[in-house]
Image (cartoon, grey):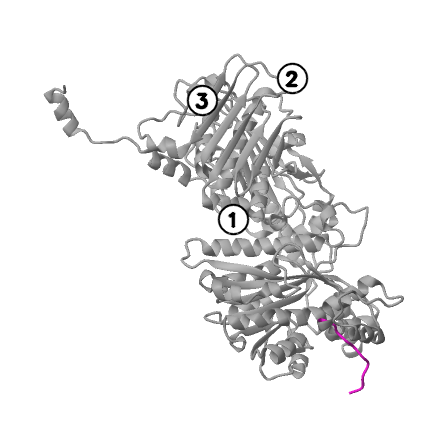
Amino acid sequence: MATETEILDEKMKIDGDPTKEFFIFMLTKDIDLKRAIADLVDNSVDGARRLRPNGNYKGLFVEIEANADRFSIRDNCGGIDVNVARKYAFRFGRPKDAPEMLKHSIGQFGVGMKRALFKMGRIFAIESTTKSSTFTIPINTDVWARKPDKWDFVFKTVDENYRLKKGEEPGTTIEVTKLHSSIAEEFASENFQKRMNLDLAADHQFSINGGLTISLNKVALKHATPSLLVSRKILPAFQTIILNGAAPKVNVRLYAGIGESDPKNAGWSIFCNDRMILGGDRTIRTGWGEEGVPSYHNEYARFKGYVLFDSDRADALPWNTTKSGVDMDSTHYRNVRAHMISAMRPVIDFMSRVAREKKRLSEDDESQYERIIQEAKPAELESVKKNSKFQYPVRKITTEKSNMANIQYQRSHDQVEVAKSVLKVSKASQVGERTFDYFFNRECK
Amino acid sequence: MSRSSYERINYSLRPAKCAERKMLCDGLRPLQRLRTLKSFRYIGFGSTYFSDFILFHKHLGLENLVSIEKDRKNSPRFEFNKPFGYIKLKYGKSGEVLPTLDWNNAPTIAWFDYDNRLTADVLADTSYFISNASVPSVLILTVNVDPEPPDVSAVDRNKSRLESEVGIEKVPADVTEKDLEGWGLAKTSYRIIANEIADKVAALNGGAANRLLFKQLFHFHYSDGAKMLTVGGLLYDEGQDPDVASCSFDRLDFVRGGAEPYALRIPSLTFREMRKIDEKLPARRTPRFVSIPIEDIKQYIRIYKYFPTFAETEL
């Protein structure tokens, strides 16, 4: 029987328990579908890193299938240990006492997998096999949500003394069915599939280039290796920064230079433990439009900057929980951003000079700077040598034509074509010069 | 400088195009079950020949006719060739002209008969039309789908050209260079157009009370030299479903609702041969003539109603 104080306590109690519906809603609201799937791939990539700390992922694969009926992801990247599954992998959030899961990991907040699954549908099946254990977990969220106080999931099968069959590889398979209708609609769209293909390839470009095969609906993802133009005359900036205040050590590599003109992808790309979290950024987040750096303009379409943060401790890296951007409040990022701003200024000055030179030249003249750029060859980041700032030859932009004046005018194409053939020249500027000389010699001498 | 196709070729002498035009005309006629044909506006690229305008005006009774002409320089020539006062000429690129037209309560039949390949601009016109057209409206697109000539030295030339012309994000992920040879570029261009329309319709249906639907009616492959693709269909809303069903578009032999095209092939026959075949119609068995390939006879019988006949005349 309840005592008087307990009854009083009960009266005074205000219910603060989270409801599962609220939890699911909050969890899935802030992440878009492509990011949620990238999170699942992160788990596989972490597995690959565990198996192959040297970064050579040849032979490892992640296969994603997504259509209007189902989503699945299957890998041979080592699997989830039963004990990890039981204690950590399915908890919402990572408990403080969780063991150091993996040095250099990219999964860290303990929400990625759950969030991705809830985002997509209502029925999940997870099966995973390691060298020594195997388990399966079926989850029906409708049934799960009906019991407000019970947050546990239940293994369907579990074997902690498992021995791999011949030819069997340790790995994980996750399947989602009963997709939410909006998700099914997106998966059915070929355009969505292509955007997902491009985004996943960009997010995981380092792992892909390290030999990991990631496929989406049987199409292997591809991504060009990040590179910068290098020549005897043009040298990209490459600095290394070690951040180690009170927090665990974070190594930073920072590159700034030029690449092919690419207005869609120019800008800064930021990686945390090889996972891209920001690609081709041209906003104030990466220093554009601040401290003497102009706002982005197509003149700067060749700008390419890469910042690679690496740390054994994922929580020391400046990413947000959806890995879709930098945590602007991170002291580490604020520090590095100041370096980024200093590193990009000479690159921007160079591109402004190229543009100024082009403006002064007429269509037919060859730009000296353009030629210098053409001579430079793309070099992978790994091969770029340390160099505190971007270097380029400073030239006088135009030859001094102190006694020269420019004349510009327009005449119809047809007339100019006729004049060209009469004068036997191929350029419009020559028509201008010859006709001027013709007039001058007859009328002004 | 390359000349526009109207300067190179007389439209009315392209036999497959001519047959296609007549088929489209027949394919549009059932729209009268939705509303009177006269109440549809027609938007096309009339060029100097206005062949589509003449046909649709005379046979469907369309009167509100808008021709978009990008060649502003030669406007006197276009005005001179305008066959009816009903036609209003609008100068500029289609992407510039479309937003200047009135889209409120203006059911429209549009045939964007581009002579160029599929580009981001074509997709932008498609999106613009889907987003702005009143229901019911018909959108028909024709694009050139001639791939680059084979060249072993250039890797992925068709693919990289397509990616740069339409945007890499629009080229389906599984498309390889091999898929773009022969009629492959037509198949891929079709997929890109169909994806664009489906995505736009899905986006517009987000949160809308009355669902927008697109029923594909036309999917032609033909060639009068260059390979061409035509895709078209009806944009309507859910409420019009019974009326659209009563149009019975599917009864027409050339109507195609999916990825399988209607290959419009014009067999090469002489007048005498055609007259001979005509005399045998209707025929339960394909009539045979000594040396005419049986496939040509079969094909002729399939499309003889739309078969163009050209003769040299002095008017």
Q: Which mark is residue A49?
A: none
> Dot 2 corresponds to which residue?
A166
Q: Residue furthest right?
A: B290
Q: Residue furthest left?
A: A4
Label 2, label 1: how many angstroms apart (C-alpha)? 61 Å
Along the line of sight, which residue is nearer the eye, B260 or B5? B260
Task: Report the side of B6 relative to A35 (left or right).
Answer: right
Q: Chain of mark 1?
A: A
Q: Amino acid at mark 2?
A: Lys
Between B3 and A91, the residue placed more toward the observer is A91
Q: In the rendered image, which quarter is residue A171 located in?
A: top right
Asked if the residues shown at circle 1 and circle 3 are in contact, with their CB atoms under 8 angstroms apart, the answer is no
Of the numbered discs 2 and 3, the one sitting upstream in the chain is 3
Q: Which residue is mark 3?
A: A155
Q: Quadrant of the C terminus of chain B?
A: bottom right
Q: Report the residue at 49% width, 42% height from top.
A: A287
Query: Hey, what amino acid is under mark 1?
Result: Pro
